[in-house]
Image (spheres, rainbow, N blue to C red):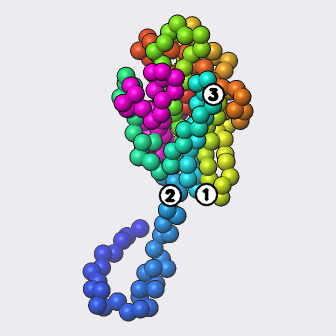
Amino acid sequence: MKIARVRLSFLSLTPALVAVACAHAPAAPAPGIANLSPALPANTVALHFHEVSGQVTDHTWPADTPRLFEKMQPPLGSYDCDFVGEGDECYDVFFSDEKGALDPRGRYLTIEASFLESDAKEGGLNLAEIVAELSTGEMVSATKVIRAVGSGANAQPASFVLAVDGNLETWSVLGTSANGIPLSLTVGF
């Protein structure tokens, strides 16, 4: 398709031309509505991460926050977390590809965590649910685990899918990152 470049003076535009130009302009998304990543359901306005450290805590982010389009550099620490769980448990959340690599136009959402306590009874990256809140008020839960990286004796591999089971009474336990490997969970809606 060829695109013609035309220089117009605002003085030469008639009301009819202005109406035609406006009618053909692409519609902008409603303010605050994230249609930026195919990872999210259409019209997502917020993301809720239900993290469990003794109790379920809802960490909520606007869906268009710049934090979702960037990945923190390891090692994660409390000064550069998207949210903090128990003690030094630090979370980073970002749009990704299926391998958990940063991709602002990715189809998935990756949650990475640093949890350095290797002798803890329970491991880190404890998520009960990941939910997209739509502009209509509807809540849509993530439904599939695409990739999970757990580590250590306190990892519970059978629990990895509990982050997307829609039940706030169950959660993932991915273990420890004391060996230098970040805990990671990549999910899809």
Q: Is 107 included in the stretch rendered in magenta? A: no
Residues rendered magenta in the picture:
77-106
Q: Which residue is mark 3?
A: 55
Of badges 1 and 3, the one in the foreground is: 3
The relative height of residue 69 versus residue 122 in the rendered view (above or below) is below
| Residue at image coords 55%, 28% | 185
Q: SS of the residue at dot 3? A: loop
Amino acid type for the residue under numbered disc 3: Gln
Q: Position of residue 114 (x, y in %)?
A: 46, 22
Q: Position of residue 79 (x, y in %)?
A: 36, 30
Is residue 133 left or right of 3 when viewed as pictured?
A: right
- The answer to whether residue 146 is visible is no
Residue type pointed to by label 2: Gly
Indicate the secondary structure of the residue bearing disc 1.
Answer: loop
What is the spatial separation of the Cα atoms under label 3 and label 2, in whole angstroms?
30 Å
Q: Does the rendering let one see residue 45? A: yes
Is tag 2's residue or tag 1's residue first in the polypeptide sequence? 2
